[in-house]
Image (cartoon, coloured by chain):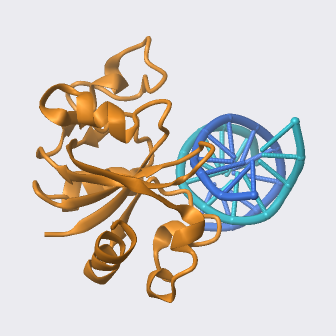
Chain colours: A orange, B cyan, C blue
Amino acid sequence: MQYWLMKSEPDEASIDDLAHAPQRSLPWTGVRNYQARNFMRDTMKIGDGVLFYHSSCPEPGIAGLAEVSSTPYPDPTQFDPKSPYYDPKSTQEAPRWLLVDVRYVKKAALVPLAALREHDELADMRVLARGNRLSITPVTRAEWRFITEKLMK
DNA sequence: GCCAACGTTGGC
DNA sequence: GCCAACGTTGGC
């Protein structure tokens, strides 16, 4: 059992969108970074905890909790020429991009990015590192507990 | 809209 | 394999 922080632009997929999706679950489409893909393909397991983070929006921060709800499979958007995530170099035989499904667990009062920065316990979080752009980052059990028990009440 | 930081591409 | 140029991310 591991923990993750996954960024999503709320204009694309917000915590509310996830809550109202069929089965309260959505495929995590659009990741086009190899490191983030590798986390989904190689490391994530069903049931892993997810901090659902809203990025590129007026109030960036952790908006709720989710969980990994599938094993990895090819991201269908890579094969769709009309999709902004279309990848002409990928093939059905050797798909380049794999994803997992993520299921809603709960919505919480937003824990803003600025609030995360206030706590020494979270100082090593990858998402807080200068220049961080990785959309999926591992979270330690201690960080997970601190955020879910102390900051999400 | 700005711009720092980063990942990817492609010429050599 | 190097590295400059380019495109993207994402907070502010």
Q: How many marks?
A: 0
Q: Nearer the viewer, residue A87 or A58?
A: A58
When the figure is inspected, residue A115 is found, relative to residue A9, above or below; the finding is below
Side of B11 where A54 appears, left or right: left
Residue at the extreme top of the image, as rendered: A82
Which quarter shows the C terminus of chain A? bottom left
When the figure is inspected, residue A1 is found, relative to residue A47, above or below; the finding is below
When the figure is inspected, residue A133 is found, relative to residue A71, above or below; the finding is below
The x and y percentages for residue A141 are 25, 79
Q: Nearer the viewer, residue A31 or A94?
A: A31
Say which residue appears at 55% left-offset and 57% top-offset.
A133
Residue A95 makes an appearance in the image: no
When the figure is inspected, residue A123 is found, relative to residue A112, above or below; the finding is below
Say which residue appears at 25% left-offset and 29% top-offset.
A20
Side of B2 where A14 appears, left or right: left
Please identify the quarter of the rendering in which residue A49 is found. Answer: bottom left
Side of A17 where A87 appears, left or right: right
Residue A89 makes an appearance in the image: yes
Say which residue appears at 29% left-offset and 75% top-offset.
A149
The x and y percentages for residue A12 are 45, 30
The x and y percentages for residue B3 are 85, 55
Say which residue appears at 40% left-offset and 37% top-offset.
A14
The x and y percentages for residue A11 are 50, 30
Which quarter shows the N terminus of chain A? bottom left
Residue at the extreme bottom of the image, as rendered: A120
Please identify the quarter of the rendering in which residue A72 is found. Answer: top left
Side of A119 where A6 appears, left or right: left
